[in-house]
Amino acid sequence: MSESTEILLRADTHVHFHPCYDEGLFLDSAAASLKAHSANSNLVSALMCLTESHDANWFGRLAQLGSDAPIGTSGWRVRKTRENNSVVVSDDQGRRLAVIAGRQIVCEEGLELLALGYAELHDDGGPIRKVLKHVADSGALPVLPWSFGKWMGSRGEIVKQLLEDPPCDFALGDNSGRLAILGEPALFRTARSRGIAILPGTDPFPFRWDASRVGSFGIEWRGGLDPDAPFQSLKSLLANQSGAGEPFGRLESIPAFIRNQVAIRLRHFVGSTS
């Protein structure tokens, strides 16, 4: 068996680091869920793809640290790669995580777009077809993620049209906030019939308790990432396997779903009245 197929790569493709999170808990939880210990020291077997909003830049903070610099008091350290859109973090237990830069962009139509591997800042508000093409042309990976209530009505029709007449190659995104009891969105089945990949991730909420959920929902492939070029090796893996992989983790329970939906609405209400 070749080196590239000796280990299992597990990835969370929709990750936010919110200011309320404890860095140590966040990284420890991700490492445990993604099984960051690797039997092959030449490859990285755990991956987080950041999807930061326009006013967040945790990746930028990591990238500015010197090589082998500590990440606060978390017990983790950062190492630069050959890429400007990735770093590798490690701890004294030998756990390693590749961290890929990325953006979550809110488009004119009210739909969100994830730009995996996009290290620059990006304004919200552009037309989704134009933003999709821009992200793809930049070399990043565009992902159109499912979001509660946003694939219904006119916005659902827009997603359907993008699947039927795509301006570029892109993937759809699933996340663990989706209720299993509601079943899989029909647009996922449409995407599969057209050979479009579906990349799952946790999409954690901006509440302290959700930091521990990172890495608990995602996708796994046979193979590993080059620790010096994790993003490029991820792109190669996706191209070689046509995005195929096995999802892991469980969707949200009804009590947790209700708690998070109520909390996010309260947060927006308080923010709008302050």
Image (tube, rainbow, N blue to C red):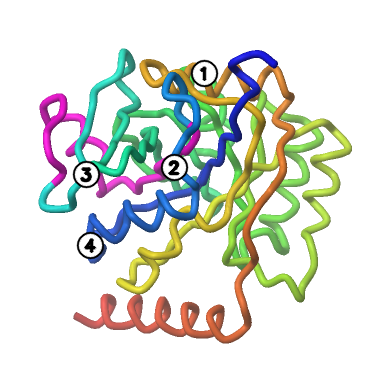
Disc on the earlier residue, 4 or 2: 4
- Real-space CA distance between mark 4 and mark 2, rounded to the nearest whole angstrom: 19 Å
Q: CA distance from mark 3 to mark 1?
A: 23 Å
Type of the residue with mark 4: Asp
Answer with the quarter of the image where residue 141 lies: top right
Exactly how many numbered labels are in the figure? 4
Left or right side of 9 for 40: left
Residue at horizontal 85%, vertical 44%? Answer: 190
User: Going from the N terminus, do you reach mark 3 or mark 1 first?
Assistant: 3
Answer whether residue 269 is magenta in the image: no
Q: Are marks 1 and 2 in contact (CB under 8 Å)?
A: no
3 or 1: mark nearer the eye: 3
**Which amino acid does the dot numbered 2 rest on?**
Ala
Find the magenta span and give its range.
45-71
Residue on which disc 4 sits: 22
Gap between marks 4 and 1 measured at Cα:
29 Å
Which quarter shows the N terminus? top right
Q: Is residue 1 above or below residue 106?
A: above
**Helix, strand or loop at mark 1:** helix
**Mark 4 or mark 1, earlier in chain:** 4
* Residue at the spot of label 1: 233
Residue 91, x across and y down, in percent: 26, 41
- Comparing labels 1 and 2, the label whose residue is closer to the camera: 2
In the rendered view, tell whether residue 72 sits above or below residue 122: below
Residue with the mark numbered 3: 76
Residue 140 x, y percent position in the rendering: 48, 24
